[in-house]
Amino acid sequence: MDRRDVLRQSLAGGIALERGNPVGLGAPDGEADAVTRWATMAAYEFLRFPDHERNSLSQPDIVYGRAGGIDLRLDVITAGPETQVRPTVLHIHGGGWVKLMKEDRIMYLFPYLAQGMNAVNIEYRLASQALAPAAVEDCRRALHWVHEHAKEYGFDTRKVVVAGESAGGHLALMSGMLDRSAGFDNAGAYGLGTEPAGVAAIVNFFGITDVADVLEGPNQRGWAVEWFGSLPDRERLAKQLSPLTYVREGLPPIISIHGTDDSAVPYEHSLRLHEALDRVGVPNQLVTIPHGEHGNRRWSREENLHAQTAVFRFLRQHNVL
């Protein structure tokens, strides 16, 4: 099964379950329920790019850049014809900077698509391909790509949201909080446009905000150690790669969602970010999942619905939706 098959099966199978039972054509009048109506509409009206019906010779994925001999790939899904401009989410998968791929989180896009947003689902170089800070450089390049190709796919550049979970949450924060002066755009500078790559909001699901904390000391994690490898001056680089370093006035609104019993990324990471943002007056919200472990799939359905509802309420409050 190739990557296109993974994407196709994920989209086709993305109908919600009600208490573990499929929601389907069970209404007494024989009409489809609201979930099935939406899924049917999405299946036949939403578009995935590259569109192989239009161009059968196109590549399996869109290449947004090349680094270290590796093609950096993404998918675009538009919530209808690409000629219509829509708010857009750039989604970044987690995996401790060492594992997973964009197809593993394709279903995480569904809530955003259901809100009428376009979605850009990206991959980036993992530790086995390139050590830190490559992942940050790649995600910044992807954000620039979104701005540069906005007219082609109907991205509303005034309403771009970056979102991710775990390491993807860290990368979403870094992508949205940085500007060119931080230096992480330099690796792809030749191919980047001159326009700023701003975002309207950041959605951080239990992301790392203090990289040094998981690199050394009592909260050390093997995945963080692997991302740095044997790089010199790791303490300095860890600070440069920490979202807490870039807290300042004028940042876009940030919402963080975190479980208090997270055993991979301590809850304090989101709490410290929330407190730091409050001190400088950046609009932000911390959604706490009491006793929540690491990962949405370790939360109950009610907890996930609470979290996602809070995200969309936050985006509406800040005029993204």
Image (spheres, helix red, strand yellow):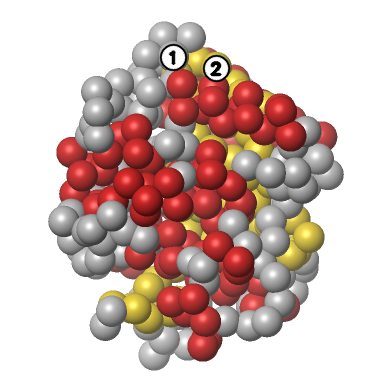
**Is 53 placed above or below 115 here?**
below
Residue lying at 74% horizontally and 74% vertically, measured from the top left: 83
**Is 303 placed above or below 83 here?**
above
34 or 135, nearer to the observer: 135
Residue lying at 26% horizontally and 43% vertically, measured from the top left: 224
Q: Secondary structure at mark 1?
A: loop
Residue lying at 52% horizontally and 51% vertically, measured from the top left: 174
Residue 272 pos. (x, y %)? 54, 25
Cα separation between marks 2 and 1: 7 Å
Residue 256 pos. (x, y %)? 57, 31
Residue 258 pos. (x, y %)? 49, 24
Q: Is residue 122 visible?
A: no
The numbered dot on residue 260 is 1
48 or 92, nearer to the observer: 92
**Is 297 placed above or below 147 here?**
above
> Residue beneath label 2, please?
288
52 displayed left or right of 294: right
Q: Residues within 10 Å of mark 2 (few under 14, many from 20)?
A: some
Q: Residues within 10 Å of mark 1 (few under 14, many from 20)?
A: many
Give the amino acid at mark 2: Thr
Q: Is residue 217 visible?
A: yes
